[in-house]
Amino acid sequence: MEDFDNITWDRFLELGRIVKAKTGKALVSYVGNEPDCIMIMLQSAGTWMFDEKGKPNLANNDVLKKIVTIYAQMIKEGICLTVTDWNAYIGSINSGTVASAVNGCWLVGSISAVKEQAGDWAIVNTPRLSNVKNAVNYSNLGGSSWMVMANSKNSGVAMDFLNKTFAGSKELYNTILPSSGAIGTWGPAADSDAYNKPVPFFGNEKIYTKIVGYSKNIPQVKYGVFNYEARDAVGVAMTKIIAGANIDTALKEAQKNVEFQMGY
Amino acid sequence: MPPVPETDTGVLSASGLPDSLRYTGNIMAGKKTLETTYKNAGWRFVMPAALFIFVLSFYPMVQAFFLSLQSGLANNLHFSGLRNYIRLFQDEKFLAAVRNVFIYLVFQVPVMLFLALILASILNDKKLKCKGLFRTMVFLPCATALVSSALIFKSIFALDGLANTWLMGLGILAEPKNWLQDPVWARIIIILTVTWRWTGYNTVFFLAGLQNIETSVYEAARIDGASPSQSFFKITLPLLKPVILLTAIMSTNGTLQLFDEVQNITAGGPGNETLTISQYIYRLSFVYNPQFGYAAAVSYTILIMVAILAFVQIKIGDKA
């Protein structure tokens, strides 16, 4: 597993080729039209589909271009398998059709569902982009967030509540992890008992301690309001690029699309 | 007070009722004639249904039109006139959806109606045994749940699904083909699913139409020496014209509003390749930041398209 820790995507591709040559299987899989992997890579480089002012940042985004090139190459070489929907994605992981999964830590629940694979899995950090400044081996995908609306009637009370619970109570995290598998990204939660238990499925590693440790290094990005429109546009662009379209053209069309949706 | 005829001339008047029962225009006479009773009763029967249709169909339609003249996110709507309709033409996703829907229309409707016609002709054969069983089998797909049948078709054409297993077993394919990620094949599979489902429905209509044609017409044609295909094209088709028109318009309407199959099988397909207009409306309302005004405008385009196509079909039907 050390071979996969703290590596770059180029190294990931190399290892993927070795795995494919020896076993004929893909290293990782993703749902066909969903740009999940691209989102992971974007945040690990500290950028996003929108710039700080909230304008779409797809057409002249060098980082996005590099990301899209890597992803397209993974698919072309068969290192990344594309499946039709979420069920097929989970199926490909559970049935061993692919060797690994690069996704949010919430996938642990789905991976642990197959008892026969106990002990065969381990957790490492995400590959990083090799030719991008500030790129790290950490990222974020999905999960839930608590937001207090500034205009709400009792925002002060709500914030106090959250400060005392999700942002202040180790006991809370201690309770919800064993009972619901809810992994929090609050730093001090790593000290609680539940988080420091070894997990048998993952070879008795203390995976939750690891994950919370990773979460300290995730670059913060501003998602913006038009996230889903942009995701969709990037997904469409990705499909065109895999089918052979020019990357610049496809990303320019994606940008035009998002600007259209934003121009209501 | 106009005179009431004392004698019944025995001749039926223009309204089809004998003189003595005709409405004489004199309500104050206190005589409730049969015709008024019929008229009033008719209105009373129609009123509840008409009220429902008005409140649940027409009123929302008018409201939707007013919604389509507004733009903004979620509840922050402001009046913007025809802006939404003008925007439509620059919308890449909308234009792709229209293109897809017309591809489905052009290929799926003629094929389905033709198949339905053939099936109906076969099922109409007097010498056919177990007619009831066959008719049930033909109609059964239509009675299944849309989502279930769509998901089953999806799993048949999945990477490890039945289609790939069979084709590889027969040696036609060397490795599993990703059917649903290929633009052309994804559309073909959707057309297949829709045709599988709705052919039986249209067969029933054609069957009813065929059974209205008297067999003596066919016998006369046979005696005159007409071949089966001649009697099909020169007798059956012209006599079935109203039914063909009805099913064509209904199928056009259904295909233009296609949603369930596409959403469940490809969710819009590789990129925008199988996206339909209804799906786009759904996304605009519930997936992206809700733009209900724009979504209402997109839904009105479907109305316009269906209206134009129905008009064209009726005109062609009248001419032919």
Image (cartoon, rainbow, N blue to C red):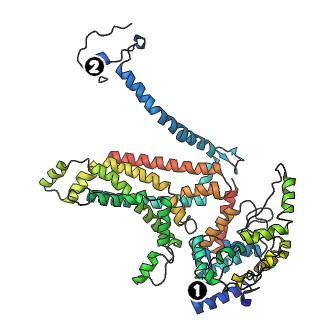
- On residue A25, which mark appears? 1
Q: Position of residue A213 (x, y in %)?
A: 82, 78
Tell me the amino acid under the disc marked 1: Lys
Q: Quadrant of residue A25?
A: bottom right
What residue is drawn where x is 76% and y is 71%?
A: A177
Relative horizontal placement of residue B111, taking residue A96 as reference (left or right): left
Which residue corresponds to mark 2? B18
Q: Would residue B15 be found to the left or right of residue B67 on screen?
A: left
Give the quarter of the image for residue A69. Answer: bottom right
Expressed as whole percent of the image width and height from the top left, the position of residue B310 reads 43, 47
Residue B91 makes an appearance in the image: yes
- Residue B55's disc number: none
- In the picture, measured across the screen, residue A14 lies left or right of residue B33, that is right
Image position, residue B96 (x, y; %): 55, 61
Q: Circle 2 — which element?
A: loop
Q: Chain of mark 2?
A: B
The residue most toward the bottom is A22
Which is more toward the observer, B194 or A143?
Answer: A143
| Relative side of B115 to A234, left or right | left
Q: Residue at x 68, y 64 (%)?
A: A230
* Classed neighbour count for the residue bearing mark 2: other residues with Cα under 10 Å, few (<14), some (14–19), many (≥20): some
Taking the view exactly as shown, the residue that stands out farthest to the left is B223
Q: Considering the image in quadrants, where does the N terminus of chain A appear?
A: bottom right
Q: Position of residue B78 (x, y in %)?
A: 70, 44
The residue at the point 25 percent across, 14 percent down is: B8
* Residue B30 position by quadrant: top left
